[in-house]
Image (cartoon, rainbow, N blue to C red):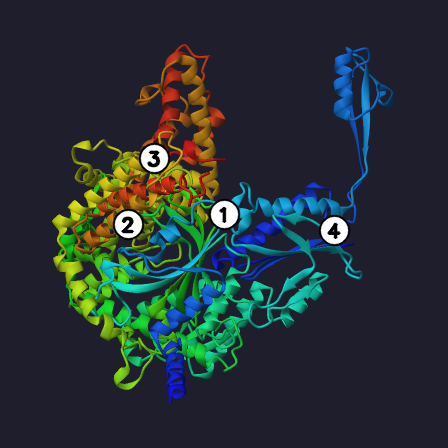
């Protein structure tokens, strides 16, 4: 079966857009092929800075034939209706239609036979359409054609299109189409500098081969392999180790068609700059890799660049040029760093009074003051030195005003730590400045030093409470202030450090600080948000979300560490037979209660009367409930949830026996009404007793 | 004797014009190159601007249907970039070489690469790259897509396909090339400090460096830009330029608002307002929120000037 080869040859495509463009091209073309009945065997897309290519293998030469029946009007219908039907069905006269009986009479039916068109014709319609509507993040017009409205838009000017179709063993046909003056053909071009001549291509195999000879590595994965392999080798040969960087690797591979890896060096004096700043400078500005000394783990004064040509001097000029640029860049970075060191962090703070954090949440200075206050309170709770926590909170944002962070925002926090260390701050304070942003993502470390914990929590809680107070909550996929991440950060810090916090008290108090008179009690809402995030977090760790609900449903649950321990104990309990049966019993009790309460239009809460307990099973149950309640609340008070569950487990045989032997809706007793009510109260007591550990009605199963 | 003197003059000229040895030679070579491609070689616009794009030969000529190919050097002033002559790479006044080709020719990338070859950058020896860089000028209401052009890791030019200028679609699209002349010269001359650039291509006593020409100016203007520029006067000047621009625009329209007769003088005032704003910004007297509103005010002027230009003969109005 024939194969399709498509190449869209253009001026340089931005590296960051290449991978998605290849995926989009494959999906758009193959979806359209399938829609047209052309089911193919396989497809692959490739991308280089100058070309977007696709091969689809095993496309049928022709669309399948289709037979379609179209139901028309009734026989004897008005002439107008029949004429309309003929037109819609493409028939010349009504004689060409069949007559078919139906429940309501005879109807005309048009049988339309469509023989499949040659695939090449269908493809010639699909491709220009895909090209015209290609989803580039940003597209442009160019050249003389751009004077007319509706001119073709592409990521950068499109110069040539290769489109061939045919079996591998034969000379393929060109899929003929033309789009804004660019006609499809079978000619492409090699590397811009090394082999710029025209190349005639047939199929994917000779296409890939000829391009390789013309110094173009078509497959981006292959270019990445070459770069990674050669970079590691070069570093190793000099006794160093490449600092791997997947993002940079993909970008570097997106900037070259013929990767040539070279190594350069810079003055050792620049190693006085923090490694992260050197790396950011070399990576962000020059798209080069850095290498480290495997013995010390520190950066070496070398860097690795990826050129696009095999230079006639073996790369000397290229290395020399890159070294000069990197020297200038590092000189700038060093200047920034040295300049920053001249100003103490606290001396930068007054500037925050003129910087708005958020229109409705005041200045950065006001925000810092809130974080300081909150970090101080938290310090007492988490066992941190209060003065240190307040000092760290005071300084934690100061590096935002430094030159280095201005230049490389990703070094925020880290630079704060360096500058704090340089000005002789306490080690815990310096680390808290760096760590207060943590955890930055699901894989990031969670701070554990108490001072860091206090500041990290204060920063996140202030953000959350603040945005809640002004009603800027995340909605759907929109979370511009990364509030979900902040909440998850709070949860992880609390759980990992087994902290005991009354979140609702804390957030309510802080809400009053943030919002002042506007304080509207939105924090209960915030607690529900924490509950949601906690559920997501626990579910990811394999816990059942209904158990989280069952625990959260109890009043006053805002201590995340306890909640999780309760959930764990509950899960273990429900894994036992006692747990399962007790759950069944409680649910049964709740069901009966619901039905009876509805019937009677009243609820059966309140104490049971021991005088009205007749059957030995109900007496035993009542006694067991009293005992279980006492034991369970004692255990809960000691936070021994396993013991609380064991106390509950003791209820189980009595609940089972009660349902076995005792009839709730008594009829055969003179005292039936009072007995029934008392028994319903007893059922309620079962439900109430289990509330010492969880709301069983929220548990599934 | 006469013959010998002529010969000496000719070879001296060759030395002076070698783009790898003299700053002015670099400029002359680029002018020669683009002249040979049919460009009109213009002279710098006689007003203070932040970039070559502000020259009406780019901003205004990029609008409208008429073909237009031009090249020129434009002294560019960025008051905030002053470093009192102490930074080897940063200047508050520098030169851009600007090329505008409308509509953008299909071989514009090749033309650009050939211009690099003309100034001695051999693509067989140097790693030349087109790295994504989308251009936007908030004050001009303009944007385009293109690249930074890298030579061995150094950005030597900006390459932009204008999509919109003064808020209007470019139809057809113009291609704009901007060479940072000092940087390019530092590269081809192999010099690390801009002030060490050989300006006139001579050696020994006859040599004039970039520092000889501009160091004092950088020091003086840095003092001016950061410390002494008269802000009260500048605030006044901004208002005056803005008002004048509006007035000239109003006066230039005909009764049907179909034709405009004073787009260029009005645009001068827009340029003026923009530069005055840059000076105020360098003096640090414009707050963050105000900054945005000043940019918007200049943009409104630029848009109104663009609209006026499109109603002139140069802008293609019948």
Q: Name the residue under label 3.
A: B253
Q: Name the residue under label 2.
A: B271
Contact between marks 1 and 2 (CB within 8 A): the answer is: no
Find the distance from the CA under tag 4 to the CA under tag 2.
Answer: 60 Å
Given the image, what chain letter belongs to the residue carrying mark 1? B
Q: In which quarter of the image is residue A548?
A: top left
Provide the secondary structure element on which disc 1 rests: loop
Q: Mark 1 points at which residue?
A: B172
Contact between marks 3 and 1 (CB within 8 A): the answer is: no
Badge 4 density bin: few <14, some 14–19, many ≥20, Cα 10 Å: many
Find the distance from the CA under tag 1 to the CA under tag 2.
Answer: 24 Å
Marks 3 and 1, the one that precedes in the sequence: 1
Q: Mark 4 points at which residue?
A: A59
Q: Where is residue A64 in the image (x, y as percent from the top left)?
A: 79, 41
Given the image, what chain letter belongs to the residue carrying mark 3? B
Provide the secondary structure element on which disc 2 rests: helix
> Is residue B27 in view?
yes
Q: Residue at x 75, y 13 (%)?
A: A80
Contact between marks 3 and 2 (CB within 8 A): the answer is: no
Looking at the image, which is closer to me, A428 or B245?
B245
Badge 3 density bin: few <14, some 14–19, many ≥20, Cα 10 Å: some
Find the distance from the CA under tag 3 to the CA under tag 1.
Answer: 25 Å
**Residue A618: image tag:** none
Provide the secondary structure element on which disc 3 rests: loop
Give the quarter of the figure containing the N terminus of chain A: bottom right
């Amino acid at each position: 079966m024939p194969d399709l080869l498509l190449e869209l040859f253009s001026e340089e495509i931005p590296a960051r857009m290449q991978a998605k463009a290849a995926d989009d091209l494959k999906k758009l073309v193959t979806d359209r092929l399938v829609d047209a009945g052309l089911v193919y065997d396989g497809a692959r897309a490739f991308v280089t800075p100058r070309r977007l290519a696709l091969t689809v293998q095993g496309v049928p030469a022709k669309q399948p034939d289709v037979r379609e029946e179209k139901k028309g009007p009734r026989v004897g219908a008005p002439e107008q209706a029949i004429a309309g039907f003929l037109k819609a069905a493409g028939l010349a006269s009504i004689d060409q239609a069949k007559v078919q009986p139906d429940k309501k009479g005879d109807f005309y039916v048009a049988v339309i036979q469509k023989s499949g068109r040659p695939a090449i014709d269908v493809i010639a319609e699909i491709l220009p359409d895909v090209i015209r509507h290609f989803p580039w993040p940003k597209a442009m017009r160019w050249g003389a054609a751009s004077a007319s409205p509706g001119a073709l838009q592409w990521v950068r000017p499109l110069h040539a299109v290769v489109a061939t179709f045919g079996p591998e063993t034969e000379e393929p046909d060109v899929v003929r189409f033309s789009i804004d003056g660019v006609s499809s053909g079978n000619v492409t071009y090699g590397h811009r500098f090394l082999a710029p001549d025209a190349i005639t291509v047939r199929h994917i195999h000779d296409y890939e081969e000829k391009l390789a000879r013309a110094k173009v590595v078509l497959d981006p994965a292959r270019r990445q392999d070459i770069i990674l392999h050669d970079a590691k080798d070069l570093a190793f040969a000099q006794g160093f180790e490449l600092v791997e960087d997947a993002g940079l690797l993909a970008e570097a591979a997106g900037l070259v068609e013929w990767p040539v890896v070279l190594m350069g060096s810079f003055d050792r004096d620049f190693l006085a700059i923090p490694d992260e700043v050197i790396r950011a400078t070399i990576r962000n500005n020059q798209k080069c890799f850095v290498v480290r000394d495997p013995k010390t783990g520190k950066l070496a004064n070398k860097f690795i660049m990826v050129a696009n040509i095999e230079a006639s001097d073996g790369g000397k000029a290229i290395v020399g040029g890159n070294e000069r640029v990197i020297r200038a860049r590092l000189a700038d970075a060093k200047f920034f760093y040295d300049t920053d060191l001249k100003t103490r962090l606290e001396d930068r703070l007054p500037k925050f009074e003129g910087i708005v954090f958020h229109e409705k949440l005041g200045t950065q200075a006001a925000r810092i003051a809130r974080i300081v206050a909150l970090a101080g309170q938290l310090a007492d709770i988490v066992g941190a030195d209060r003065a240190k926590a307040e000092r760290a909170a005071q300084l934690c944002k100061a590096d935002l005003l430094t030159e280095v962070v201005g230049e490389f925002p990703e070094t925020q926090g880290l630079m704060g730590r360096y500058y704090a260390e340089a000005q002789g701050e306490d080690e815990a304070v310096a680390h808290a400045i760096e760590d207060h942003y943590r955890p930055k993502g699901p894989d990031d470390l969670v701070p554990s030093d108490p001072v860091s914990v206090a500041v990290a929590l204060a920063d996140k809680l202030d953000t959350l409470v603040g945005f809640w107070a002004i009603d800027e909550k995340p909605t759907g996929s929109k979370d511009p202030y990364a509030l979900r991440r902040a909440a998850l950060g709070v949860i992880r810090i609390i759980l990992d450090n087994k902290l005991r916090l009354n979140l609702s008290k804390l957030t309510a108090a802080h809400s009053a600080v943030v919002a002042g008179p506007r304080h509207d009690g939105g924090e209960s809402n915030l607690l529900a948000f924490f509950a949601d995030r906690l559920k997501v977090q626990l579910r990811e760790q394999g816990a059942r979300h209904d158990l989280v609900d069952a625990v959260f449903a109890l009043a006053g649950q805002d201590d995340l560490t306890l909640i999780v321990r309760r959930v764990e104990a509950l899960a273990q309990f429900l894994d036992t037979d006692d747990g399962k049966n007790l759950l069944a019993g409680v649910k049964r009790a709740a069901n009966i209660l619901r039905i009876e309460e509805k019937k009677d239009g009243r609820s059966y809460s309140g104490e049971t009367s021991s005088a009205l307990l007749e059957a030995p099973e109900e007496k035993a149950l009542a006694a067991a409930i009293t005992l279980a309640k006492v034991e369970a609340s004692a255990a809960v008070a000691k936070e021994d949830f396993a013991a609380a569950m064991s106390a509950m487990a003791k209820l189980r045989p009595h609940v089972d026996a009660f349902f076995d032997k005792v009839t709730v809706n008594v009829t055969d007793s003179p005292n039936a009404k009072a007995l029934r009510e008392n028994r319903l109260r007893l059922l309620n007591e079962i439900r109430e007793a289990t509330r010492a550990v969880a709301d069983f009605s929220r548990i599934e199963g | 004797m006469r013959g010998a003197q002529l010969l000496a003059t000719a070879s001296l000229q060759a030395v002076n014009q070698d783009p790898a040895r003299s700053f002015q030679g670099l400029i002359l070579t680029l002018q020669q190159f683009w002249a040979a491609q049919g460009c009109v070689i213009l002279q710098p616009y006689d007003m203070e601007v932040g970039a070559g794009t502000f020259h009406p030969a780019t901003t205004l000529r990029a609008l409208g249907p008429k073909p237009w190919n031009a090249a020129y050097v434009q002294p560019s002033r960025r008051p905030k970039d002053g470093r009192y002559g102490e930074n080897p790479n940063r200047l508050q006044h520098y030169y851009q070489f600007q090329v505008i080709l409308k509509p953008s020719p299909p071989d514009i990338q090749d033309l650009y690469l050939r211009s690099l070859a003309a100034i001695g950058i051999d693509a067989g020896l140097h790693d030349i790259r087109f790295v994504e860089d989308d251009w936007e000028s908030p004050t001009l209401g303009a944007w385009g897509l293109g690249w930074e052009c890298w030579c061995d890791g150094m950005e030597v030019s900006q390459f932009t396909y204008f999509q919109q200028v003064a808020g209007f679609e470019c139809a057809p699209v113009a291609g704009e090339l901007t060479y940072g002349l000092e940087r390019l010269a530092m590269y081809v001359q192999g010099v690390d400090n801009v002030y060490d650039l050989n300006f006139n291509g001579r050696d020994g006593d006859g040599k004039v460096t970039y520092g000889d020409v501009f160091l004092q100016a950088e020091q003086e203007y840095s003092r001016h830009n950061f410390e002494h520029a008269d802000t009260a006067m500048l605030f006044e000047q901004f208002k005056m330029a803005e008002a004048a621009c509006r007035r000239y625009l109003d006066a230039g329209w005909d009764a049907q608002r179909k034709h405009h007769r004073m787009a260029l003088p009005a645009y001068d005032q827009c340029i003026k307002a923009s530069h005055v704003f840059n000076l105020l910004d360098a003096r640090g007297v414009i707050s963050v929120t105000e900054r945005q509103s000043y940019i918007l005010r200049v943009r409104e002027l630029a848009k109104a000037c663009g609209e006026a230009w499109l109603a002139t003969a140069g802008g293609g109005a019948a």
